[in-house]
Image (cartoon, helix red, strand yellow):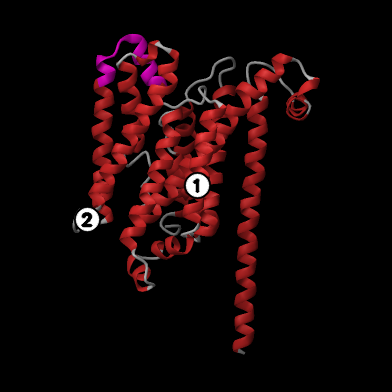
Amino acid sequence: MQSSKANDLNQAYQRLGRRRLAVIMTLVILVTGSLFLDVITGPAPLSLSDVLTTLFQPGAVNEANRTIVWTFRIPTALMAIFVGAALGIAGAEMQTVLNNPLASPYTLGVSAAASFGAALALVLGSGTLIWTTTVFVPTSAFVCAMCCSLAIFAIGRLRGASTETIIVGGVALHFIFSSGVAFLQYMASEDTLAAIVFWIFGTLQGASWHKLAIIVVVMVVTMGLLMSRVWQLTALRLGESHARSLGINTERLRLQTLILVSILTATAVCFTGAIGFVGLLAPHLARMLVGEDQRYFIPLSALSGALLVSVAALVTKLLIPGTIFPIGIATAAIGAPCFAAIALLRRRSYW
């Protein structure tokens, strides 16, 4: 009797694993399809055949098509995928270690800090030269994002600091840096103000192969380190006391995870601007589909974020033909209704 029950449980567990893998494979297909649509779409008309020929037989197409596909379309489309994946992972792990459904790089001030760094660089005049725009602005955004992250770590290391203290401190930092951005906008000239506003809403138009390589390397290393801690993170999500009873140093795990996701977030937003709602929505979608098991939750959060940003990139090109508006507007327009729908339909059952 007991053997039969154990066998039934084993089969149910295997079915659950297969269903979760099927969900992940479905997302992989959707992300791949969105990637190809993103490469095809743009001011210059290209068919899927043109793109495939350019990819696999570059000598058979003209120089213009090679330049469009290899220099602009593919880096931009891949940047959307990897930035979305990075923000999805960052939001997922922030929500896990802080045990709060509203934790994300955007709500805890990391994105606002990056915006402040970029705005400061632009006000100081870096927008007048190309190399300073492509180097100094991302560097300044990265440094400010990491300063915000270090401030959150410092709050977390205060004696007796709880996860609520960290969240409140992060929200306070968000408003401090937002007020700094507002002050810089007030002081900026008309052209600089336009550049700041465009950067704050997020853009993929500055994508290049070397920026993409940096994000990919950071994301692969970060994701590898997080995947090596999947059982500890899953236990932590089940409760602080439960994790401690298993011998897990929860304080060290929480701070190590925050360091990793802060580096990941700072690397992503310093090149693209503050793209909102991705780090908030992607983990909720993943949690609703595969639950809290981090073996599936982390990859699916990455795929959900990648799909959201890639679809948003398509929307920015298709909504007003001939014009590409900031991607942060599209992610907010798509993400806000989806987030509200999840909260209203699922209520508390998914958290």
The residue at the point 52 percent across, 40 percent down is 217
The quarter of the rendered structure image containing the N terminus is bottom right
Residue at mark 1 to residue at mark 2: CA–CA distance:
29 Å
Query: From this viewpoint, which residue is outermost toward the right?
Result: 60
Query: From this viewpoint, which residue is outermost toward the left?
Result: 159
Q: Toward which corner of the image does residue 181 lie, by quadrant?
A: top left
The residue at the point 64 percent across, 85 percent down is 4
Percent x, y of residue 50: 76, 23
The residue at the point 40 percent across, 47 percent down is 260
The quarter of the rendered structure image containing the C terminus is bottom left
Query: From this viewpoint, which residue is outermost toward the bottom?
Result: 1
Q: Earlier in the sequence, mark 1 or mark 2?
A: 2
Q: Residues within 10 Å of mark 1 (few under 14, many from 20)?
A: few
Q: Which mark is residue 161?
A: 2
Q: Toward which corner of the image does residue 137 lie, by quadrant?
A: top left
The residue at the point 40 percent across, 37 percent down is 266
Q: Is residue 44 above or below residue 300?
A: above
**Which element carries disc 2, helix, strand or loop?**
loop
**Identity, as a three-letter code, of the amino acid under mark 2:** Ala
Q: Which mark is residue 221?
A: 1
Q: Which mark is residue 336?
A: none
Horizontal side, residue 1 vs residue 187: left or right = right
Q: Specify start and end residues of the magenta stretch as a single range.
A: 184-198
Horizontal side, residue 44 vs residue 182: left or right = right
Q: Is residue 25 magenta?
A: no
